[in-house]
Image (spheres, rainbow, N blue to C red):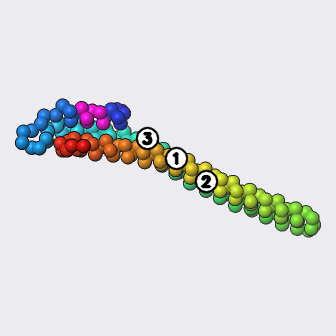
Amino acid sequence: MVPFEEIIDELQEMLDEAWNLPMTGGKCVLDGEKVRENLEGLRLNFPGEIKRAKSVLDERERIILKAKSDAIQMIKNAEQRAEIILNEQAIMREARDKAELLVKTAQDDSIKMKKAAADYLNGLLKKTEELLDNNLAAVRQTRRTINGEKE
């Protein structure tokens, strides 16, 4: 597959080499089939950052679900252990303390994992947004060039 930037360059070259039609305000003649091929190439080669951002979102969701599942499992394990040792006060107190610590640790870990996933996703989305802004600017410039508009 042809890289995204090469397709943009090819479209730009087509515009640079196009015939200007007299008395049309700068309109030019382009090979419609070639333009369609290039547009399809753009569609097929859309930057991988979008795919990676979706992958990050999916991974973030998976991490959050796993953290919740682990926390629930830790709580269940702590509760089962506490029920087994209810007969002795000291052991019961120790089990309750351990269960609370496990829950707190699981909650803290879950919060950290959510924040890390959100920070990572935010960074990727910011890069994607910048890339899309650049691509949009290039498309707008190409349209202005096609339409014979001045910058």
Query: Is residue 43 visible in the rendered structure shown here?
Result: no
**Residue receiving disc 3:** 48
Query: Is residue 13 visible in the rendered structure shown here?
Result: yes
**Residue receiving disc 2:** 115
Residue 14 in percent (x, y) is at: 21, 33
Residue type highlighted by circle 1: Gly
Q: Which residues are magenta?
A: 8-13
- Work out whether 94 lies above or below 112: below
53 on left or right of 151: right
Image quadrant assignment for residue 99? bottom right
The CA span between labels 3 and 1 is 15 Å
- Work out whether 20 lies above or below 72: above
Q: Mark 3: which secondary structure?
A: helix
Image quadrant assignment for residue 92? bottom right
Residue type highlighted by circle 2: Lys
Image quadrant assignment for residue 143? top left
- Please name whichever residue, 138 or 103, is drawn nearer the observer in this view of the structure: 138
Q: Going 56% across and 47% down the picture, which residue do you hit?
A: 120
Q: Going 18% across and 31% down the picture, which residue do you hit?
A: 17
**Residue receiving disc 1:** 123
Does residue 110 belong to the magenta stretch?
no
Nearer the viewer's eye, disc 3 or disc 1? 1
Residue 113 in percent (x, y) is at: 63, 52
Q: Residues within 10 Å of mark 3 (few under 14, many from 20)?
A: few
Residue 146 in percent (x, y) is at: 20, 42
Nearer the viewer's eye, disc 2 or disc 3? 2
Single out the residue that lies furthest toward the left.
23
- Please name whichever residue, 7 or 69, is drawn nearer the observer in this view of the structure: 7
